[in-house]
Amino acid sequence: MNPLVSRERQTQALLALEDGTVYRGRSAGAGGEAFGEIVFNTSMAGYQEIVSDPSYAGQIVTLTYPQVGNYGVSAAAMQSGGLALSGLVVRDMCREPSNWQSEGSLPDLLRKSGVVAIEGVDTRALTLRIRSAGAMRAAISTEDLDPKSLVARVCQAPGISSHNYVPDVSTKQEYVVPAAGERRFRVVAYDCGEKRGIADGLAAVGCETVVVPWDTPARRVLALGPDGAAPDGVFFSNGPGDPTQVGATAQAARELMGKVPVFGICLGNQLMALAAGATIEKLPFGHHGGNEPVMNLLTGRVEITAQNHNYGLVFESLGKIVPEESGGFAEHERDLRAWSERHVAPVVMNERFGRVRLTHVNLNDGTPEGVQFLDVPAFSVQYHPEACPGPHDSAYLFTSFARLMAGDADCLDIDVREGRRF
Amino acid sequence: MPRRDDLHKILIIGSGPIVIGQACEFDYSGTQACRALREAGYDVVLVNSNPATIMTDPETADRTYVEPLTAEAVGRVIRKERPDAILPNMGGQTALNCAIALGESGVLDECGVEVIGCDLDSIRVGEDRELFAKAMGELGLEVADSGFAHSLDDARAVAARLGYPVVIRPSFTLGGAGGGVAHDEGEIEIIAGQGLSLSPEHEVLVERSIAGWKEIEMEVMRDAQGNGIVICSIENLDPMGVHTGDSITVAPAQTLSDAELQRLRDYSLAILEKVGVATGGSNVQFAVNPTDGRVIVIEMNPRVSRSSALASKATGFPIAKAAALLAVGYTLDEITNDITRATPACFEPSIDYCVVKVPRFAFEKFKGTSETLATRMKSVGEVMAIGRTFEEALQKALRSLEQGHRGLGMDGVDDLFALGEKDLEERVSTPTPRRIFHVAEALRRGWDVARVHALSGIDAWFLGRVRDIVAAGGRIRELGLAGLDAPTMLAAKQMGFSDEQIAWLTGTSAEVVRALREVEGVRPVVKTVDTCAGEFAARTDYHYLTYEAAPVLGAVPAGEHAEGARPRVMILSAGPNRIGQGIEFDYCCVHASAALRERGFETVMVNCNPETVSTDYDTSDRLYFEPLKFEDVMNVVEVERPQGVIVTLGGQTPINLAHRLKAAGVPIMGTQPDAIDLAEDRDRFSRLLDRLGVAYPPSSTAQTVDEARSVARSLGFPLLVRPSYVLGGRGMAIVYSDDDLSTYMSAAAHVSPDHPVYLDAFLEDAIELDVDALADGDECYVGSVLEHIEECGIHSGDSACCYPCFSLSDAIVARVRQITRQLALAVGIVGPLNVQYAVKDEQVFVIELNPRASRTVPFSSKASGVSLARCAARVMAGEKIRDLGLPPEDREVGYFAVKEAVMPWSRFPGANVELGPEMRSTGEVMGIARSFPEAYAKTRQAIEYRMPERGTVFVSVCDRDKRAIAPVALALRGLGYDILATRGTAKTLRAAGIECEVCRRLSEGHPNAIDEMRSGRISFIINTPHGHDSRGDGSRIREEAVSRGITCVTALSATVALVQSLAAVRDRELDVYALQDLR
């Protein structure tokens, strides 16, 4: 809200970055202080799904679309029970939303949830800064209004990799999400910060899902199927922070892969890669938005995907290329778009799980977006097929999981239009 | 899939003349398509009848045909050029219709030509309401249901099926007269009863009402692999009920949740596939019920459209270019995003700003027609503005319109304070071009958003923002200048307030506000349109200016301006299209940019018109999408610090800024503001003409009625009267009496308050000439002398003209060139100029000199083969005419080129259909042939798509023309036409021995001329009105002709040309010519 319009004086707030940049703005949420890693999200709508996405725990999110909160908030759009992010930065916050589904305003939701937010910041300049300098430590404060002091405190704050945020957002108790319609499968989902959209996506393809805490041992999971048997499949969810901090879940993945069909999204994808012994790298500023083009190398079709991650797997660390299954090419390519241009889905030989195929590539920067284990029933993607917010192109991946559990080897060869059915 | 190698030569069909609803956005798309396909290695053949386009420049395509877009003419081009494929989805509905006609004519099959980029069947599904409804039904989507009724019982039955409320539209009434919304059976009886009686066919359309719903457009693309992307969502501020072209629209959509938007995305992509769009861009329109989110599909256009041009400019994604490449086999992931040059075009643009488009109207030119906006588009142009917020973008857009406002009111431009409550309520409820100002006034008075929403249907979010703007204005007024400290000033600028608005609110001048801002350090920053919200580095300089607070600590720059390496030239283009200032000026600016880039300059374009080629991001080195107002232009100047600014190519818009820019120390290139003033100030110019011994019609100026009367006494009637400093003959009239003059003077005061009215002796029956030339201070080159077909008194923009002259002697043309040369040097022109002359009794009179490029420059350039705008730009940059290698002025060319104006009468029912001194045409066509009548015939074909070859001609001429009509009528009889005439005209014709039938006056019962038209007997009409009969029979007859699409000629001179051309094309096919062969 423009300061010339507000009737009472708005609370001042500061945003400080570890590189010494400080913006002055106005409070647009709860008062107080928030420290975290600053990232930007380029989705033009879907702010409520973003702020309620548990993967943002430990992060201060900058929304690049300048006017935020226009259509209000509603219970239906929540992606989790609360708001896990550290803070929110916007250019202009709307206090009087308009939409038939609106049940309140975003600033009120932030305030009630204790999330510190700042408006009036040049979010584009900030975004360009993050793009060039990388994601970094930052703080929003309505209390410490001394720029130098706040910068100094940001520099002393711990980085995001020093903490495991998953326990903060994971369920403490097991619970069951029923299938929508006929139950076809019983699935166990590791909740590392699972979005509701994913639970809905699993339910929609006939999964009855037992949601379990992040550190549930594999042997417990193997008894959660019908009548104490192994479940039809196991799912590893999205979640916040550095995957190398989430050792217990990675260990469970290592034990479960090969025993039951496994599917992973985002952090789940990284944990499955770790289970296979791969290296994880941190991207400079990550992918956060709803417009990332990803090619499915099996169909040649491009999906416009929703993404939210700062870490990713290093494809070549999964193993050596198997030329005879990789169109005759023997060398790894640094930029994976070499494969999308060839329309070849390369296969590597992994020491633990055998052959692994690269199935999805990001066309913007050539990073890996999905892999399929050919010798064990498992696949995972780095992006968000449940969207929420974002396009529905990749929703077919839930069907793929159903097919995988049904024993279909070609489970990923599905037209993107499948996901856009209405 | 890579490019198709089985295709080599591709024919692109343009969109023909600029008409309302189909404007220069199709020049933009067609030009992009030509360039993209040539870059991809194809030979491109282009056909378009509109000479004012960049696409018809001989450099744009390999082979360029300026020919009518008829199946016959394009068929001849196909037989001559033998293309492998035609691409018809770049030229709007005109090109699609042409493609369908070509298909039906059999020429495509005969020559083995493939239609690419769209499928003729899918066009039909998109067009045909029933097929479309069926297709949507199969997808499970709703369309606005409707049914025709021929009786009250029918109407009730249809309404019962659809559910109330329903909209009743009587068929075939002018402007939808007699329709309305019925909420129950009782209202059906009244409204449908009335409608049935008003409709000549006793038929009404009963349609489910979705008025008041949100209107959303999705711009989508698809490739042959089935990859689909949404380029942009657009939300209309005006709810359903107003044509999207006439609505204020906003991108991206503002009031829909992600879930709602993604659902529309799913629908859009499914609709594309269902309708059968294999590749390319489409526009899908939805209505969304604001109370429950229910969605109805309104329509889809399986081609690039006005909205796709807007979406391209709004996002930086070149839809037309991508669509052209997709049509030849590329897939979206194989096309590179031009802006980042590192990522593919297969993605969905994310924008980090708000875009507002506001249409520009021209109702002042069409008195008598209703200003209420409805489903038939009436706007003649549009502006787009970019801001970080909707508030900022809206205010920038409203000042970009150049209609006096400096933003959303609060500028003293018009005073709505005095409006009565009831009156204001009415104006808030009725969609008109000015409704947004009335909405603002209502909110200023403290009406709450709910009340204004109930009246207007505009979404509460938009109303809330308008209320905020008004509240901020109130706060600025309260604070006064002294209270505007730096943070407050910044807040005001972030709300989009112009310096002029702030000045008005605080009782000071814009200069003072600007100076205060400077002191406070509140300056605009440069931001970039980059398709990706900053995620990737932009390699293209497509910018806008906004206001942002710098960090309080640290050195993160707010702006994104990078110093250029080469000397910079800034080109001010023409702003929104309007009648009198359209695509022609944008054309000149685009050429100047190209010429100067070739000469090593870095060019900086400033414009706010999203339809144009000038606002394509690769036309210039740098593009600033900004209003062409002093404040905004100065902001760009201060950022770019150009070596010079070009003001003489963008029409009157930049000319009007020249003085202030010069005074602010900005270097003006070419003709200096003082020389501009010398040419535009009638007194100074008259003194110059006297000194040079050049004749001009006796003239004088007046500020009051009495002064005007005394001028009239000395000059005598008729007089040509007009306000000073206007373009397009705004407010110009011919007056024949003292009474006319008084009426005119009292009305003219509103046209241009600071300037007097000019009164010229009117030279009746003189031949008018338009001369386009350039001068470098030492030398002058006359590029063309154009002879008008219509006589003096009809605005040159509405008059047809011919190159070279078809009736004047070489001696007179030489004399005209001589005078032009003399004037150009005496005035001090450096760059382009245009002089208008009247030739009467072998005497040459100067009517006016425009010290800038004229509307006819594109036509002159194409007709003469000399690109005058390019040459003018080079001269302004310091080159000399003698070094440009221009051909001799008096060379023989061996062909005739005719330009004819296109009138928008059918859009403005009730307005007087008559050519006059005030310009009303929206566009133009060109015809090239070996003789003048043949060339003129081509222009008629280009406008009407057919020639009236036989039947009955209705003739009714004013007394002045009676002597001259006989030979025309004789020629018509000779061509086999029957003649029907009014009593007076018939008397003259019979006296000359010409057989004709007499027709009743309208007041004399039936059958009269209107009945004859309705019966379909009349093939065309000759009706020359005299100044006084404008509301009589003639006007009703002309109106009826327009509504029935019957050619109506209102000037005798044009009648002669038409009859000559009818004779010329009788039983003969006209050859087609490529521009490249004429050189």
Image: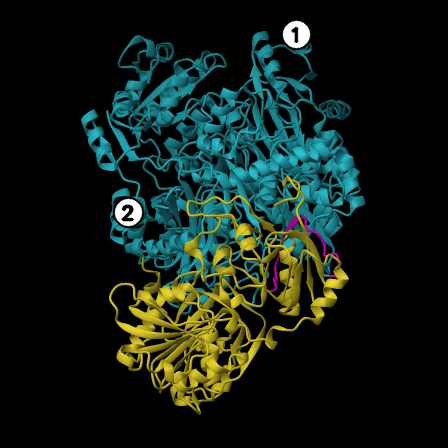
Chain colours: A yellow, B cyan
The answer to whether residue B971 shows anywhere in this view is no
- The chain letter for the residue carrying disc 1 is B
Residues at discs 2 and 1 in contact (Cβ within 8 Å): no
* Residue B553 in magenta stretch: yes
Mark 2 → mark 1, Cα distance in angstroms: 66 Å
Residue B622 to residue B94: above or below: below
Residue B265, horizontal then vertical, whole percent: 40, 55
How would you rate the neighbour count of disc 2 (Cα within 10 Å): few for under 14, some for 14-19, many for 20 or more? many
Which contiguous range is marked in magenta?
B537-555
Q: Which residue is mark 1?
A: B713
* Residue B984 in magenta stretch: no
How would you rate the neighbour count of disc 1 (Cα within 10 Å): few for under 14, some for 14-19, many for 20 or more? few
Amino acid at the residue labelled 1: Arg
Q: Report helix, strand or loop for mark 1.
A: helix
Q: Residue at x 49, y 25 (%)?
A: B427
Q: Which residue is mark 2?
A: B132
Q: Residue at x 79, y 40 (%)?
A: B515
Residue B504, horizontal then vertical, whole percent: 70, 30
Residue B1000 to residue B916: above or below: above
